[in-house]
Amino acid sequence: MMKTTVKSLERSRQNLFIGGRFVEPKSGNYSASYDPTTGESWYEFAEAEAADVDAAVAAANSAFRNPAWRRMTQTDRGRLVRKLADLALERADELAAIETRDNGKLIKEMRAQMRAMPDSYHYFAGMADKLQGDTIPVNKLDMLNFNVREPLGVVGMITPWNSPLMLLTGTLAPCLAIGNTVVIKPSEHATASTLALAELITEAGFPAGVVNVVTGAGRSAGEALTRHPGVAKYVFTGSTETGRRIAANAASNLTPCSMELGGKSPHVVFADVDIERAVNGVVSGVFAAAGQTCVAGSRCFVEASIHDRFVEALVARTGRIKVGHPMLDDTDIGPLALSAQLTKVESYVASGLREGARIAAGGKRPQTDELSRGWYFEPTVMVEAQNDMAFMRDELFGPVVGIMPFSSEEEMISLANDTRYGLASGIWTQNIDRAMRFANQIEAGTVWINTYRSSSFMSANGGFKESGYGRRGGFEVMREFSRLKNIILDYSGAMQDPFVIRLK
Ligand code: TXE
């Protein structure tokens, strides 16, 4: 079989991956995927519609019942997931190049991400034979009461365009280790890496239909998948608005969801810190990946006594950030992944100015010839920001931070929690009591103290409030994607009176 390479993807058409084969979409329609550095199309992906989604869900359901998967031992399942990890490691640099071409993320970041990703597959592979139930006292003689954990069935995964493979791993790896089957609907803005992974799935030896990929638009392929009665659970990562719609679609079939949605995370800096370190933390929290991370620390609260010094240092540091082509090793910020993102960021910066905020750094597209064709935006520091300004309320998903001073801990907590989101948060202080008071009071699923964006697949992450529900990572995810079954076994040999419940 021909391997997917960046070269082979170029100017080519990619098909759907259903039942272990790449197949053409029933409609015969394909759409362009664009290179964010030029705005030009670089390959075409298939537009799946309801009939293709039906076929993918049917393939996944039949794979779920196929003894080759259903009756595979846990250890063998773990072995397969490990094999996938090894293949992904062999192809890490190639997968990284595909991600960069498709979504404009920095090649150095994508290489690091792709080389680290297999560790996460290994971690979940190791859990394949560790998911255990329990026995329960039953207060009756010669009777056993126990719970077993079993896979759910077909899991529908709707994934986003920022780090598609890395974000997929946190649920795909555990789902496979548990014995579920999956239908993945990648974002129409970055499908290539998920299709490349599909090839590795076959190469690793997963039975046909265990993993299926249906590319296409959210309004067609996505809608068909999230309304499908044959799916046991949905995993969604994306905007709060689309999450709400998917949850409503799923509710019509009483299908549960795990949702990782938007964020507007607070990043707090107290006067007792080393300013340079905190500045680097804030820069990494909001400008890394051009701000296209769900945990971006986009609202920064600075203790009033150091506000001006902090802003000065942040502006100076921001001025040294290199915006450039994502394939170059000295680039710090590449383009935004979609032209719609660029328009969104520009319009929120403009509305911030109208509402009274001021630009201290950045605020526009870079004016150089070499970057003018791509979807680049300068790292932007907005001062005199307020929580009720649109750019401080909504998720921008771009390199823009709003700065606000605070005078007391109480004021800071109330400002930090004044958001409909609750994904992440960060605090810089040398006072551990204060840091722990913040950790206890902040309404967010993740708290970083004197660091930001450090993450581990070994911990369970997820949102509070409108940032979603359900957890990814750690052992918790194994419970999310399995279900409990209670079994009662009577080995007394005596049949009781059929109309009287046995008391002992
Ligand atoms: O997101 P959508 P988009 C946020 C970020 C960004 C905004 C818009 O603020 O600016 O979302 O990005 C599929 N039924 N995040 O438009 O719409 C869609 O095809 C079923 C945060 O890309 O949420 C894609 O696969 N599926 C974020 C996925 O949903 C539907 C990551 C995400 O798309 C659908 C990405 C429908 N009706 C964006 N409509 C994070 N939390 O990391 C769309 N989709």
Image (cartoon, rainbow, N blue to C red):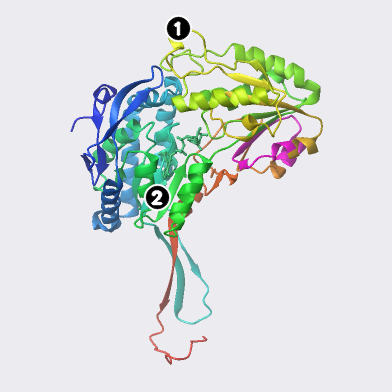
Q: Is residue 357 above or below residue 18?
A: above
**Callout 2 crowding tier (Cα within 10 Å): few <14, some 14–19, many ≥20:** many
Task: State the count of labels.
Answer: 2
**Residue 434 is inside the magenta segment:** yes
Residue 291, percent across and down? 54, 26
Where does label 1 land, which residue?
Answer: 369
User: Is 485 or 240 nearer to us in this picture?
Assistant: 240
**Residue 284 is inside the magenta segment:** no
Residue bounds of the magenta highlight: 415-438
Q: Which mark is residue 226?
A: 2
Q: Is residue 468 above or below residue 358?
A: below
Residue drawn at 72 percent across, 19 percent down = 310
Q: Is residue 216 above or below residue 384?
A: below
Q: Any atom of ligand 1 within 8 Å of the CB at mark 1?
A: no
Quadrant of residue 283 within the rendered picture: top right
User: Is 188 or 504 nearer to us in this picture?
Assistant: 188
**Callout 1 crowding tier (Cα within 10 Å): few <14, some 14–19, many ≥20:** few
User: Is 379 or 453 nearer to us in this picture?
Assistant: 379
Q: Which comes sooner in the sequence, label 1 or label 2?
A: 2
The residue tagged with tag 2: helix, strand or loop?
helix
Residue 242, percent across and down? 48, 43
Residue 163, percent across and down? 44, 31
Q: Amino acid at mark 2?
A: Thr
Q: Any atom of ligand 1 within 8 Å of the CB at mark 2?
A: yes
Residue drawn at 34 percent across, 41 percent down = 82
Residue drawn at 48 percent across, 53 percent down = 248
Residue 106, percent across and down? 45, 21
